[in-house]
Amino acid sequence: MKICPVFTHSTPFQVPMWSEESERLRFEHRMGFLSTIGDPLHVSYEEFLVRSKIRELTGGDVAVPLQRAIDTFELARSQFEKLVDRPEFTMHTKPVILVCRTNVVVARLLLAGNVRDRRVTYQFMPESPIFPILKLVSDK
């Protein structure tokens, strides 16, 4: 979610615009599995809007949300890695850890600005159909 302002601010990635209600429903669907883990990993959509400051980030410098996305992916990865030893969570956490690691790399490349000839796409893994992995692809 932290990287969304980057894509709504810049053109290499098309983000569909939905109504506020459908955006809330998508958020709740994506974050639903975290509700079984409890706080602090699970937040409501309203709390997400307040904490993420996503509305403020969509109008400013793209480097700010990119750095926040990197920090958040790294924090999420480290938190999920703490759950790897718990078998009841392993099935859900390992794919999310891979998503976090991959997306950190893509976000760092975007922040460095060395990928102007590429566009950002995404794909969903079968093991993690909720959280997309970002990919840089050449238009050539």
Image (cartoon, grey):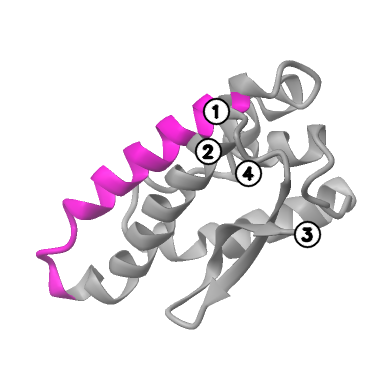
Task: Name the residue rendered at 34%, 51% in the picture.
Answer: 38
Question: Compared with residue 92, is residue 114 higher up or lower down, i.e. above or below?
Answer: above
**Mark with earlier residue (3, 2):** 2
Where disc 1 sits, the SS reads helix
- Give me the C-alpha separation between circle 1 and circle 2: 5 Å
Cβ atoms at labels 3 and 1 below 8 Å apart: no
Where disc 2 sits, the SS reads helix
Magenta: main secondary structure: helix
Question: Compared with residue 102, is residue 70 higher up or lower down, i.e. above or below?
Answer: above
Q: Quadrant location of residue 127?
A: bottom left
Task: Name the residue rendered at 52%, 35% in the picture.
Answer: 69
Q: Between 42 and 75, which is closer to the camera in this rendering?
A: 75
**Mark with earlier residue (4, 2):** 4
Res. 40 in view? no
Q: Split into 4 quadrants, where in the image is the C terminus?
A: bottom right
The residue under label 1 is 112
Question: Is label 1 or label 4 in front?
Answer: 1
**Magenta span of residues:** 65-87
The residue under label 2 is 109
Cβ atoms at labels 1 and 2 below 8 Å apart: yes
Q: Residues within 10 Å of mark 2 (few under 14, many from 20)?
A: some
Spot occupied by residue 99 in the image (x, y as percentages of width and height):
43, 59
Cβ atoms at labels 4 and 2 below 8 Å apart: no
**Residue furthest bottom in the image:** 126
Spot occupied by residue 8 in the image (x, y as percentages of width and height):
80, 39
Question: Is label 3 or label 2 in front?
Answer: 3
Question: Is label 4 or label 3 in front?
Answer: 3
Q: Split into 4 quadrants, where in the image is the N terminus?
A: top right
Where disc 3 sits, the SS reads loop
The residue under label 4 is 45
Q: Residues within 10 Å of mark 4 (few under 14, many from 20)?
A: some
Q: Which residue type does callout 4 highlight?
A: Tyr
